[in-house]
Image (tube, coloured by chain):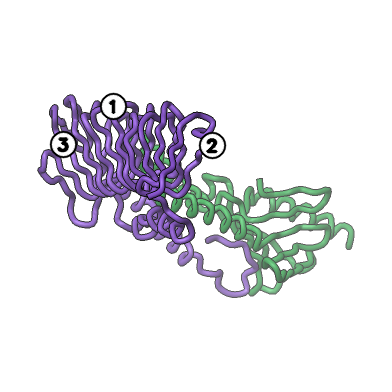
Amino acid sequence: MAQAEVVEGEPIKKHHFFLMIFILFLIVFFYLIYSSYNGGIGIKDKITGKVLKDRVLKENKNMTMHIISGELNIPEELIISSKIEKLQISIKDSTFIFLGDQKIELKKDSIIVIDEFKGKLVLIGDKIAVMIGKAKEILINTVPISKKSGTEIKIKNDQEFIYKNIMLKEVYISSYSHPSKGDIFIDEEKIILNLDNENLDVKGFIGDLEISQGKLKINGKFEKFDLNEILKGKTLNKTNK
Amino acid sequence: MEIKKGEDILKVRNTRKVYIFFYLMIFILIAAIVYIKYNGAEIDDFAIKLVLIFAIFILISTEIHRLGNSYEINDHSVVHRRGYLNINSSRFEFGAISDSDVHQSLWQRFFSYGNAEVHLFSKENRILIRDINKPYEFVRFLHKKMGAFRRRNG
């Protein structure tokens, strides 16, 4: 780098610093381009990839997790922006999705299975409004679509599409708060809740979700459950087994 | 403008124009982000953080570098200060100065900055003031001050 100085000897060599910065710039630049168009080179994953899961597990050590299962109505909008271990979607009507740069047609009744989905998934009723992220492996009608080892496949939809059913395995939802109708079983039926358009407020859910035939099936664990809204309403059955 | 004129003191530091290449790197990274977004690709969060860290590092390090050297022309001398926490100050009385030059490369001329070289009577020594904005203005101010000094001191 240039420098103002009284010359009593040779000026300080500035090229090393410039070269170092330039190399740093090239690294940042190529990482930016490569990660955006080729699904990353794994650096990020090594640093942040399992943070969410680790965080949940760490919290679990300090918090008692409760088992939850049940069948409810479909929430108006469900936004998931964490890792989903396995995502299986059965398409109702034909649509298009982008896998990397390729636009792929999904025919009516196609089944798409996505392994280790990381990104954003927005479900509005029986439609998938947003599905943007990366996946380790994708199977369309049992045909595997994968990239060279170590890279992830980018997946994106540019139009919303209707699903017949959708299954999310090992998904983390920090907060689920929706008016719900149906039965909820907590800690193996120690607590049974019959909800009738009351607000179900669950924090730190980890488990499986399945939406099919207009019903949302929940099966997993949670950290906190807010009963206030429900107690204002009506039914709370507690049985001892 | 790097030259700060007080009533009768001129203080200069390196011009920020010296760091154009560094700023250009930041600009290229930001342009790349805009281009990627425009193309609808998803930008990796970690890459954005890297760009941000790189940009902040460049901006802070160039500013710190500028603070490392300063020059001052007052009524009777040229003063050069070096350092950040420990300051080394060298004073060159006008009586010891013989003449001065300005050196500008094509690039420097294009951005109107350059180096001023102040020669002392003892030939081995010279004060090289690198990469200042408007070096001719700096030298003109020096000559004006030296003329006034010589008139005052016969």
Chain for disc number 3: A
Measure the alpha-carbon separation of dots 2 and 3.
40 Å
- Earlier in the chain: of badge 2 and badge 3, it is 3
Q: Which chain is purple?
A: A
| Residue in view at x 24 percent, y 53 percent | A151
The three-letter amino acid code for the residue at tag 3 is Ile
Q: Which mark is residue A228?
A: 2
Q: Which amino acid type corresponds to the residue marked 2 in the rendered image? A: Asn
Chain of the residue under the numbered disc 2 shown in the image: A
- Frontmost of labels 2 and 3 is 2
Chain name for mark 1: A
Q: How far from the left and from the top, in percent, is residue B37? A: 37, 37
Sequence order check: which comes first, mark 1 or mark 2? Answer: 1
Q: Which quadrant of the figure has residue A26?
A: bottom left
Label 3 belongs to which residue?
A: A111
Give the residue drawn at x 41%, y 37%: A193
Q: Secondary structure at mark 3?
A: strand
Q: Is residue B44 left or right of residue A90?
A: right
Q: Dot 1 corresponds to which residue?
A: A126
The residues tagged by marks 1 and 2 sit, at their Cα atoms, a distance apart of 29 Å
Q: Residue at x 24, y 26 (%)?
A: A162
Residue A233 location (% of width, % of height): 50, 29
